[in-house]
Amino acid sequence: MRGLVLLILALTLLVPSLAQAYDLLILQSKRNPAYDEVLNGFNASRNLSKRVIVLSDYAEVDVVRIAREDRPLLILAVGDTALAMARKVRNIPVIALMSLDLQRFQSVQSNLTGIEMFVAPEHYCNLLRQMKVRRVGVIYNPSRSGWYLRQARQAAEKAGITLVVQEVADPRDTLAKLASLAGKVDALWMLPDVTAVTRETAEAYFHFSQQQAVPVLSFSAGYLGLGAAAVFDIDRVALGRQAGEMVAALLEGDGRDAIPSHFPREVALKTNAGILKRLGVSLAE
Protein backbone atom coordinates (compact mmCIF):
# COMPACT_ATOMS: atom_id res chain seq x y z
CA MET A 1 0.00 0.00 0.00
CA ARG A 2 2.80 2.41 0.88
CA GLY A 3 4.38 1.74 -2.52
CA LEU A 4 1.10 2.51 -4.26
CA VAL A 5 0.75 5.82 -2.41
CA LEU A 6 4.28 6.81 -3.39
CA LEU A 7 3.55 5.92 -7.02
CA ILE A 8 0.42 8.06 -7.04
CA LEU A 9 2.32 10.98 -5.54
CA ALA A 10 5.04 10.62 -8.15
CA LEU A 11 2.52 10.57 -10.99
CA THR A 12 0.83 13.63 -9.53
CA LEU A 13 4.11 15.53 -9.66
CA LEU A 14 4.91 14.36 -13.19
CA VAL A 15 1.49 14.88 -14.79
CA PRO A 16 -0.11 18.29 -14.20
CA SER A 17 -3.85 18.30 -13.69
CA LEU A 18 -6.29 20.98 -14.69
CA ALA A 19 -6.10 22.27 -11.13
CA GLN A 20 -2.35 22.62 -11.60
CA ALA A 21 -2.58 24.79 -14.72
CA TYR A 22 0.74 25.90 -16.18
CA ASP A 23 1.87 28.59 -18.56
CA LEU A 24 4.07 26.72 -20.98
CA LEU A 25 4.19 23.26 -22.53
CA ILE A 26 7.75 22.56 -23.70
CA LEU A 27 8.12 19.85 -26.34
CA GLN A 28 11.72 18.75 -26.82
CA SER A 29 12.52 16.44 -29.74
CA LYS A 30 15.21 14.50 -27.89
CA ARG A 31 17.83 14.78 -25.19
CA ASN A 32 20.56 16.88 -26.77
CA PRO A 33 23.22 19.18 -25.25
CA ALA A 34 22.44 21.86 -27.85
CA TYR A 35 18.78 21.86 -26.82
CA ASP A 36 19.82 22.01 -23.17
CA GLU A 37 21.82 25.18 -23.88
CA VAL A 38 18.80 26.81 -25.48
CA LEU A 39 16.52 25.87 -22.60
CA ASN A 40 19.08 27.02 -20.03
CA GLY A 41 19.03 30.45 -21.66
CA PHE A 42 15.26 30.42 -21.78
CA ASN A 43 14.81 29.35 -18.14
CA ALA A 44 17.26 31.99 -16.94
CA SER A 45 15.19 34.75 -18.48
CA ARG A 46 11.63 33.60 -17.77
CA ASN A 47 10.01 32.45 -14.54
CA LEU A 48 7.04 30.49 -15.84
CA SER A 49 5.22 27.39 -14.72
CA LYS A 50 5.89 24.70 -17.28
CA ARG A 51 5.67 21.06 -18.25
CA VAL A 52 8.52 19.52 -20.26
CA ILE A 53 8.03 16.46 -22.49
CA VAL A 54 11.04 14.91 -24.22
CA LEU A 55 9.39 13.16 -27.16
CA SER A 56 12.15 10.59 -27.71
CA ASP A 57 11.44 9.18 -24.25
CA TYR A 58 8.05 7.87 -25.40
CA ALA A 59 6.82 5.56 -28.14
CA GLU A 60 3.88 7.87 -28.78
CA VAL A 61 2.73 11.25 -27.48
CA ASP A 62 -0.73 12.68 -28.14
CA VAL A 63 0.13 16.38 -28.07
CA VAL A 64 -3.35 17.45 -29.16
CA ARG A 65 -4.93 15.64 -26.21
CA ILE A 66 -2.36 17.05 -23.77
CA ALA A 67 -2.96 20.58 -25.02
CA ARG A 68 -6.73 20.13 -24.80
CA GLU A 69 -6.67 18.73 -21.28
CA ASP A 70 -3.87 20.84 -19.77
CA ARG A 71 -4.70 24.06 -21.61
CA PRO A 72 -1.25 25.70 -21.48
CA LEU A 73 -1.06 29.31 -22.60
CA LEU A 74 1.81 28.62 -25.01
CA ILE A 75 3.78 25.76 -26.56
CA LEU A 76 7.56 25.91 -27.02
CA ALA A 77 8.76 23.38 -29.61
CA VAL A 78 12.49 22.62 -29.63
CA GLY A 79 13.69 20.66 -32.67
CA ASP A 80 12.15 19.39 -35.90
CA THR A 81 10.17 16.52 -34.36
CA ALA A 82 8.77 18.78 -31.66
CA LEU A 83 7.63 21.29 -34.27
CA ALA A 84 5.98 18.57 -36.34
CA MET A 85 4.02 17.49 -33.26
CA ALA A 86 3.22 20.99 -32.01
CA ARG A 87 1.82 22.18 -35.33
CA LYS A 88 -1.06 19.75 -34.89
CA VAL A 89 -2.33 22.16 -32.22
CA ARG A 90 -4.09 25.07 -33.91
CA ASN A 91 -5.67 26.99 -31.04
CA ILE A 92 -2.57 27.72 -28.91
CA PRO A 93 0.41 29.89 -29.96
CA VAL A 94 3.50 27.82 -30.80
CA ILE A 95 7.07 29.15 -30.67
CA ALA A 96 9.54 26.97 -32.56
CA LEU A 97 13.29 26.82 -31.98
CA MET A 98 16.15 24.77 -33.47
CA SER A 99 14.15 23.74 -36.54
CA LEU A 100 14.80 24.27 -40.24
CA ASP A 101 11.09 23.76 -40.99
CA LEU A 102 9.82 26.90 -39.28
CA GLN A 103 9.43 29.16 -42.31
CA ARG A 104 7.88 26.41 -44.42
CA PHE A 105 5.19 25.69 -41.83
CA GLN A 106 4.64 29.27 -40.69
CA SER A 107 3.49 30.26 -44.15
CA VAL A 108 0.42 28.02 -43.74
CA GLN A 109 -0.17 28.22 -39.97
CA SER A 110 -1.02 31.50 -38.26
CA ASN A 111 -0.46 30.35 -34.65
CA LEU A 112 3.19 29.48 -35.37
CA THR A 113 6.24 31.68 -34.88
CA GLY A 114 9.79 31.27 -33.60
CA ILE A 115 13.46 31.92 -34.28
CA GLU A 116 15.10 30.73 -37.48
CA MET A 117 18.17 28.51 -37.75
CA PHE A 118 19.32 30.79 -40.57
CA VAL A 119 21.57 33.74 -39.71
CA ALA A 120 20.50 37.12 -41.10
CA PRO A 121 21.99 37.39 -44.63
CA GLU A 122 23.48 40.81 -43.87
CA HIS A 123 26.10 39.13 -41.68
CA TYR A 124 27.36 37.05 -44.57
CA CYS A 125 27.18 39.84 -47.11
CA ASN A 126 29.18 42.19 -44.88
CA LEU A 127 31.81 39.48 -44.44
CA LEU A 128 31.95 38.80 -48.18
CA ARG A 129 32.43 42.51 -48.79
CA GLN A 130 35.36 42.50 -46.35
CA MET A 131 36.82 39.58 -48.28
CA LYS A 132 36.54 41.70 -51.44
CA VAL A 133 34.70 39.02 -53.39
CA ARG A 134 32.10 39.93 -55.98
CA ARG A 135 30.64 36.70 -57.36
CA VAL A 136 29.32 34.23 -54.79
CA GLY A 137 27.95 30.78 -55.55
CA VAL A 138 24.83 29.57 -53.73
CA ILE A 139 23.13 26.19 -54.12
CA TYR A 140 19.63 25.87 -52.70
CA ASN A 141 16.27 24.12 -52.89
CA PRO A 142 13.55 26.74 -53.54
CA SER A 143 11.01 24.84 -51.45
CA ARG A 144 13.39 24.75 -48.49
CA SER A 145 15.24 28.06 -48.53
CA GLY A 146 13.72 30.11 -51.33
CA TRP A 147 12.36 32.58 -48.77
CA TYR A 148 15.89 33.12 -47.43
CA LEU A 149 17.46 33.51 -50.84
CA ARG A 150 15.05 36.33 -51.66
CA GLN A 151 16.33 38.24 -48.63
CA ALA A 152 19.92 37.25 -49.41
CA ARG A 153 19.63 38.75 -52.91
CA GLN A 154 18.52 42.08 -51.44
CA ALA A 155 21.36 42.10 -48.90
CA ALA A 156 23.88 41.10 -51.58
CA GLU A 157 22.77 43.86 -53.91
CA LYS A 158 23.28 46.46 -51.18
CA ALA A 159 26.78 45.07 -50.53
CA GLY A 160 27.70 45.13 -54.23
CA ILE A 161 27.78 41.33 -54.48
CA THR A 162 26.37 39.17 -57.26
CA LEU A 163 24.89 35.83 -56.25
CA VAL A 164 25.42 33.06 -58.81
CA VAL A 165 22.56 30.72 -57.94
CA GLN A 166 21.97 27.05 -58.72
CA GLU A 167 18.77 25.22 -57.79
CA VAL A 168 18.57 21.61 -56.63
CA ALA A 169 15.54 19.44 -55.97
CA ASP A 170 17.51 16.37 -54.89
CA PRO A 171 20.81 16.05 -53.00
CA ARG A 172 22.15 13.97 -55.88
CA ASP A 173 22.07 17.11 -58.05
CA THR A 174 24.50 19.00 -55.82
CA LEU A 175 27.78 17.72 -57.26
CA ALA A 176 26.83 18.65 -60.81
CA LYS A 177 25.64 22.08 -59.71
CA LEU A 178 28.90 22.69 -57.87
CA ALA A 179 30.86 21.70 -60.97
CA SER A 180 28.87 24.20 -63.02
CA LEU A 181 30.15 27.02 -60.79
CA ALA A 182 33.81 26.34 -61.57
CA GLY A 183 35.55 29.48 -62.82
CA LYS A 184 32.42 31.57 -62.27
CA VAL A 185 32.58 32.46 -58.55
CA ASP A 186 35.00 34.00 -56.03
CA ALA A 187 33.43 32.28 -53.00
CA LEU A 188 30.79 29.75 -51.96
CA TRP A 189 28.02 30.44 -49.47
CA MET A 190 26.65 27.27 -47.85
CA LEU A 191 23.07 27.52 -46.63
CA PRO A 192 21.53 25.29 -43.93
CA ASP A 193 19.39 23.72 -46.64
CA VAL A 194 18.90 19.99 -46.07
CA THR A 195 18.69 19.34 -49.80
CA ALA A 196 21.71 21.37 -50.89
CA VAL A 197 23.97 20.35 -47.98
CA THR A 198 23.93 16.79 -46.67
CA ARG A 199 26.42 14.56 -44.88
CA GLU A 200 27.25 12.99 -48.25
CA THR A 201 27.69 16.24 -50.21
CA ALA A 202 29.23 18.61 -47.64
CA GLU A 203 32.81 17.62 -48.39
CA ALA A 204 32.28 18.44 -52.08
CA TYR A 205 32.03 22.13 -51.17
CA PHE A 206 35.46 22.04 -49.58
CA HIS A 207 36.94 20.03 -52.44
CA PHE A 208 35.63 22.78 -54.74
CA SER A 209 37.29 25.33 -52.45
CA GLN A 210 40.65 23.60 -52.80
CA GLN A 211 40.38 23.08 -56.54
CA GLN A 212 39.15 26.60 -57.32
CA ALA A 213 41.04 28.44 -54.54
CA VAL A 214 37.89 30.15 -53.27
CA PRO A 215 36.68 30.48 -49.66
CA VAL A 216 33.58 28.71 -48.36
CA LEU A 217 31.33 30.49 -45.84
CA SER A 218 29.20 28.12 -43.81
CA PHE A 219 26.73 27.97 -40.93
CA SER A 220 28.27 25.59 -38.38
CA ALA A 221 31.60 25.57 -36.56
CA GLY A 222 31.82 21.87 -37.30
CA TYR A 223 32.67 22.73 -40.90
CA LEU A 224 35.77 24.73 -40.00
CA GLY A 225 37.76 21.53 -39.56
CA LEU A 226 36.62 20.30 -42.96
CA GLY A 227 37.81 23.41 -44.78
CA ALA A 228 35.32 26.25 -44.31
CA ALA A 229 37.04 29.65 -44.24
CA ALA A 230 34.46 31.20 -41.91
CA VAL A 231 31.15 30.43 -40.24
CA PHE A 232 28.53 32.30 -38.27
CA ASP A 233 27.66 30.24 -35.21
CA ILE A 234 24.39 30.84 -33.36
CA ASP A 235 24.73 31.56 -29.62
CA ARG A 236 22.27 28.98 -28.29
CA VAL A 237 22.01 30.39 -24.77
CA ALA A 238 21.22 33.81 -26.23
CA LEU A 239 18.71 32.11 -28.54
CA GLY A 240 16.90 30.85 -25.45
CA ARG A 241 16.84 34.33 -23.95
CA GLN A 242 15.48 35.71 -27.22
CA ALA A 243 12.74 33.09 -27.14
CA GLY A 244 11.89 34.21 -23.62
CA GLU A 245 11.28 37.71 -24.96
CA MET A 246 8.95 36.33 -27.63
CA VAL A 247 7.03 34.39 -24.97
CA ALA A 248 6.68 37.57 -22.92
CA ALA A 249 5.38 39.46 -25.95
CA LEU A 250 2.75 36.80 -26.57
CA LEU A 251 1.69 36.61 -22.93
CA GLU A 252 1.36 40.36 -22.70
CA GLY A 253 -0.89 40.38 -25.75
CA ASP A 254 -4.08 38.42 -26.24
CA GLY A 255 -2.26 35.47 -27.79
CA ARG A 256 -4.15 35.70 -31.08
CA ASP A 257 -2.12 38.21 -33.07
CA ALA A 258 0.50 36.59 -35.28
CA ILE A 259 4.11 37.42 -34.37
CA PRO A 260 6.60 37.07 -37.23
CA SER A 261 9.59 34.78 -36.85
CA HIS A 262 13.00 36.32 -36.23
CA PHE A 263 16.63 35.67 -37.09
CA PRO A 264 18.94 34.78 -34.18
CA ARG A 265 20.08 38.02 -32.60
CA GLU A 266 23.48 36.92 -31.27
CA VAL A 267 25.88 35.09 -33.57
CA ALA A 268 29.64 34.63 -33.47
CA LEU A 269 32.01 34.82 -36.44
CA LYS A 270 34.51 31.95 -36.33
CA THR A 271 37.30 31.59 -38.87
CA ASN A 272 39.86 29.08 -40.06
CA ALA A 273 43.08 31.12 -40.06
CA GLY A 274 44.99 28.48 -42.06
CA ILE A 275 42.45 28.44 -44.88
CA LEU A 276 42.24 32.24 -45.01
CA LYS A 277 46.04 32.50 -45.19
CA ARG A 278 46.33 29.83 -47.88
CA LEU A 279 43.72 31.60 -50.00
CA GLY A 280 45.25 35.00 -49.37
CA VAL A 281 42.01 36.34 -47.94
CA SER A 282 42.02 39.25 -45.49
CA LEU A 283 39.09 40.23 -43.29
CA ALA A 284 40.38 43.77 -42.72
CA GLU A 285 38.14 46.58 -43.97
Image: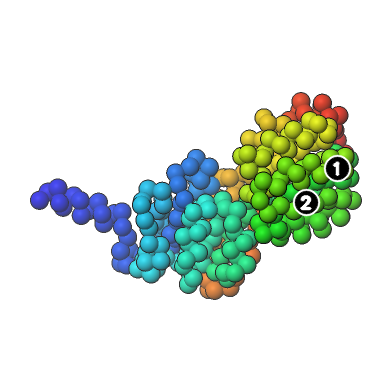
Identify the mark nearer the N-term, 1 or 2.
Answer: 2
Spot occupied by residue 168 in the image (x, y as percentages of width and height): 71, 52
Q: How many marks?
A: 2
Instruction: Return the residue nearer the eye: 33 or 194.
Output: 194
Query: Splitting the image into 4 quarters, where does residue 200 fall?
Result: top right
Residue at 73% x, 38% y is 205
Location of the C terminus (image quadrant): top right
- 119 horizontally vs 180: left or right: left
Q: Where 249 sits versus 181, above or below?
A: below
Q: Nearer the viewer, mark 1 or mark 2?
A: 2
Q: Which residue is mark 1?
A: 185
Label 2, residues with CA under 10 Å away: few <14, some 14-19, many ≥20: some
Residue at 59% x, 57% y is 101
Q: Which mark is residue 166?
A: 2
Label 1, residues with CA under 10 Å away: few <14, some 14-19, many ≥20: some
Instruction: Return the residue nearer the eye: 251 or 276.
Output: 276
Q: Which mark is residue 11?
A: none
Q: Taking the image as drawn, is residue 105 in sight?
A: yes
* Residue at the farthest left position: 1
Q: Amino acid at mark 1?
A: Val
Spot occupied by residue 99 in the image (x, y as percentages of width and height): 57, 53
Residue at 53% x, 71% y is 255
Instruction: Return the residue nearer the eye: 185 or 177.
Output: 177
Q: Taking the image as drawn, is residue 126 in sight?
A: no
Q: Where 112 sits versus 148, above or below?
A: below
Assign a secondary structure to mark 1: loop
- 150 horizontally vs 143: left or right: right
**Cα separation between marks 1 and 2:** 12 Å
